[in-house]
Image (cartoon, helix red, strand yellow):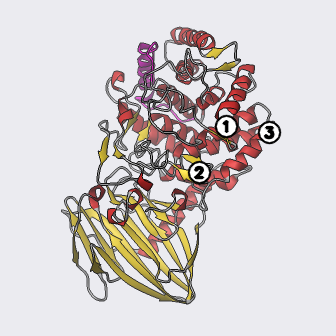
């Protein structure tokens, strides 16, 4: 069985990511992209689904770990009866090839490490051909299957029961380097990586990027780590921002709420972009906007709510029967059926993010504003259409209040573009549509008798997404309607001090099982508390949710308050960007 979700740290080269457990096992790695088939997939099954372990032979070794400064060089310290050693894990940035380096450094005494390699390409559906390709002085093991190949260098390994194992011993002052490099199987084995240069270059790049973060206030370290995570989930070449590094980590342990998050949601990417822009990263805004123009190119009627990392449209959802799932949570899915959904809020999020880019001084590109005008035309054409909402329900479409507000926000940003930035557009038409949407929402999205906004028209349920209404400027945080909504959210959706998205006991999502408090929602509530003057509550909740991050500052999607465990895909972009927004809200309130 895989380790607890919170036991994993992430390595990233801004093309793909590896998850490393506290016990030194790389249990998840897709090569060469975040959404490629897995090479190590033990996270969703057993060791036979692929992994690369490196830990002291001593079963009683004690471990602690941290990132080396502001980046993704993971340092794991091992203490044994015979000595102390440190493993530095990194995926080098900038060499445009997938490498993983594991450097063992002896600190005290002598420590023997055991290494085990189980390569399983194509989601563990391909058992590779393994061959020795090096020398006694420079051992190399090559794995090949179909289009994939990799070479492991640095220590001799021998075949044992469909795995390759060996030992490495270091004494104080000694260093041993293990490197793994993926390459297309039709090409020659690549040259060895320059390990010293890789560590130096990678650490320097992450340090320089982090130095550009504009933030001064409480929870500074959490904000910096969260922004680093958002950058680590951004594909260097395409600009696509994936929602998480994993697929099918369950929202309900043992259940079927298991989804593939290794794609670019327009919503999540737009919100990520806003977080980056607010902290000084305008180049990322330019790069993502280029991605957007390429991905959506064509008829606005064909716009999707998510795309592949390079803008791929076909993300057909499939189930992998050869995986038992994390902790028995099946099915394991690749692709995502939500790609076929209509989610009316998405264009609003895109328009809000691109407005933030304009305000930050990012010039409109040749196709950027024409694209936005076309998207507003698409929104108008579908203005009366029910949708699946921000939570991608798999039940019947509804008129979700949050979605309707985001339609208003889309036209509002169109109006601002014309009035405040001098862009050409249908000002009077968009203003009329704003007025129309506001009148509709105020009438149908608000329950006058109960004094709160509702999840969807005709419903009496509430939804944490209603906390986003003040964030996009629909109403003020201290609007009596919002205060009533917050009171109802606290009454119905708070559990052990954390906020659920909505009541799964209602018939809204069309899925069996339940889920746990959704971390982004609690951060949204922090922002709401701060905006409405409940500062003590805001700080208390912020401390509580930030305290759920694991030992290296990562957050998953949800949190099980009973078992005290992370739940869902990890690290989750939405959780981290919501943390950043909440921290910014606390700073803004303290400066008033």
Looking at the picture, how far across and down is residue 546, in whole percent? Answer: 67, 51
State the CA–CA distance, disc 3 to disc 2.
22 Å
Q: Is residue 364 magenta?
A: yes
Q: Viewer-nearest of labels 1 and 2? A: 1
Q: Residue at x 50, y 70 (%)?
A: 23
Local crowd at mark 3 within 10 Å, few (<14), some, or many (≥20)?
some
Specify the label residue 246 is tagged with: none
Q: Nearer the viewer, residue 455 or 94?
A: 455
The vertical placement of 55 against 146, above or below, is below
Residue holding disc 2: 226
Q: Position of residue 579 (x, y in %)?
A: 63, 45
User: Badges 1 and 2: C-beta atoms under 8 Å apart?
Assistant: no
Picture layout, residue 76 above or below residue 512: below
Specify the label residue 494 is tagged with: 1
- Per the rendered image, the range of residues in magenta is 361-387
Residue pictured at 62% horizontal, 50% vertical: 562
Q: Is residue 299 above or below residue 531?
A: above
Quickly name the residue at label 3.
Answer: 535
């Amino acid at each position: 069985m895989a380790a607890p979700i919170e036991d994993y740290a992430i390595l990233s080269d801004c093309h793909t990511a590896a998850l490393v457990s506290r016990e030194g096992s790389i249990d998840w790695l897709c090569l060469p992209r975040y959404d490629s088939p897995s090479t190590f997939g033990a996270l969703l099954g057993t060791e036979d689904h692929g992994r690369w372990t490196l830990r002291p032979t001593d079963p009683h070794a004690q471990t602690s770990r941290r990132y080396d400064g502001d980046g993704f060089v993971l340092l794991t310290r091992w203490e044994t009866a015979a000595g102390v050693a440190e493993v530095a894990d990194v995926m080098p940035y900038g060499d445009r090839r997938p490498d993983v380096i594991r450097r063992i450094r002896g600190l005290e005494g002598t420590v023997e490490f055991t290494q085990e390699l189980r390569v399983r390409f194509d989601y563990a559906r391909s058992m590779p051909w393994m061959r020795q390709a090096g020398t006694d002085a420079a051992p190399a093991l090559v794995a090949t299957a179909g289009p994939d190949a990799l070479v492991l260098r640095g220590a001799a390994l021998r075949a044992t029961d469909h795995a390759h194992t060996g030992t490495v011993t270091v004494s104080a002052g000694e260093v041993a380097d293990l490197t793994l490099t993926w390459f297309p199987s039709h090409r020659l084995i690549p040259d060895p990586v320059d390990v010293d240069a890789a560590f130096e270059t990678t650490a320097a790049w992450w340090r320089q990027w982090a130095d550009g973060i504009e933030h001064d206030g409480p929870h500074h370290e959490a904000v910096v780590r969260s922004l680093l995570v958002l950058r680590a989930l951004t594909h260097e070449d395409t600009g696509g921002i994936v929602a998480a590094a994993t697929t099918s980590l369950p929202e309900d342990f043992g259940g079927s709420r298991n989804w593939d998050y290794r794609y670019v949601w327009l919503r999540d990417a737009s919100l990520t972009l806003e977080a980056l822009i607010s902290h000084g990263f305008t180049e990322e805004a330019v790069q993502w906007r280029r991605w957007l123009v390429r991905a959506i190119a064509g008829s606005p009627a064909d716009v999707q709510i998510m795309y592949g990392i390079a803008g791929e449209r076909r993300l057909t959802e499939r189930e992998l029967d050869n995986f038992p799932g994390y902790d028995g949570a099946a099915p394991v899915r690749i692709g995502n059926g939500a790609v076929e959904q209509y989610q009316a809020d998405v264009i609003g999020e895109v328009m809000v993010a691109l407005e933030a880019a304009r305000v930050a001084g990012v010039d409109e590109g040749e196709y950027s504003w024409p694209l936005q005008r076309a998207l507003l035309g698409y929104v108008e054409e579908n203005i009366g259409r029910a949708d699946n909402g921000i939570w991608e329900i798999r039940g019947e479409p509804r008129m979700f209040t949050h979605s309707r507000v985001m339609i208003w926000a889309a036209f509002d940003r169109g109006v601002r573009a014309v009035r405040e930035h001098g862009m050409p557009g249908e000002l009077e038409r968009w203003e009329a549509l704003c007025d129309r949407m506001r009148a509709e929402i105020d009438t149908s999205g608000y329950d006058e008798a109960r004094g709160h906004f509702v999840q969807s028209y005709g419903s009496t349920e509430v939804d944490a997404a209603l906390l986003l209404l003040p964030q996009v400027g629909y109403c003020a945080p201290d609007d009596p309607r919002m205060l009533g909504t917050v009171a109802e959210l606290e009454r119905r959706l708070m559990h052990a001090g954390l906020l659920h998205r909505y009541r799964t006991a209602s018939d809204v999502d069309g899925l069996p099982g339940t889920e746990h408090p959704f971390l982004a929602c609690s951060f949204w509530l922090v922002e709401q508390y701060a905006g409405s003057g409940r500062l003590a509550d805001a700080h208390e909740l912020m401390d509580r949710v930030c305290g759920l991050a694991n030992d290296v500052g990562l957050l998953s999607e949800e949190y099980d308050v009973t078992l005290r465990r992370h739940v869902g895909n990890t690290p989750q972009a939405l959780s981290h960007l919501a943390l950043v927004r909440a921290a910014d809200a606390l700073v803004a309130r303290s400066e008033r």
